[in-house]
Amino acid sequence: MQGHILTIKTENDWKQLVLQNQKPVIVDFYADWCGPCKVLKPKLHNLHEQSQGKWELAVVNVDIEELQKISSQYASKGIPAVYLFHKGEKVSDFLGNNEAKAKEMATKAASL
């Protein structure tokens, strides 16, 4: 479904929606209080809408207690932390509000 964002709220969501997904998944680790996250979020959503369903966009709020293990593994250096996964494997990542890297990652995701 075009425009649908996967919201990760549990470790089971993480496994099913990211690691076991057959489509490439771009994962945005964010927090509601994070200024750069608020700036990057609409850019990622826009790229996702333009992708025509070639990849999924998932969001992980680092403040959700149940996700602390996942957040500490992937967002320990700061947020926003953005990762591209394909078939359970990390393909690439970047840190911070970087529109050029986001576009590059979206292009890569669409090619997988």
Image (spheres, helix red, strand yellow):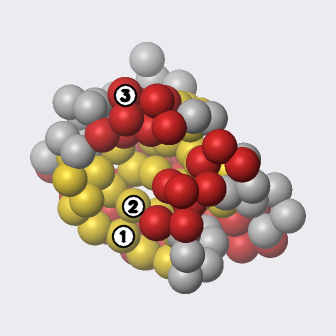
Q: Earlier in the sequence, mark 1 or mark 2?
A: 2
Mark 3 residue type: Gln
The residue to which callout 3 is attached is 16
Question: Mark 3 packing: few (<14 Cα in 10 Å), some, or many (20+)?
Answer: few
Q: Going by the picture, which residue comes out furthest to the bottom?
A: 77
The residue to which callout 2 is attached is 83
Marks 1 and 3, Cα distance to the nearest angstrom? 20 Å
Q: Secondary structure at mark 3?
A: helix
Residue 100 is situated, as x and y percent measured from the top left of the image, at 43, 75
Mark 2 residue type: Tyr
Residue 108 is situated, as x and y percent measured from the top left of the image, at 22, 58
Mark 1 residue type: Asp
Q: Name above or below for residue 49 compared with residue 68.
A: above
Q: Earlier in the sequence, mark 1 or mark 3?
A: 3
Q: Nearer the viewer, mark 2 or mark 3?
A: 3
Marks 2 and 3, Cα distance to the nearest angstrom? 16 Å
The residue to which callout 1 is attached is 93
Say if mark 1 contacts mark 3, CB within 8 Å: no
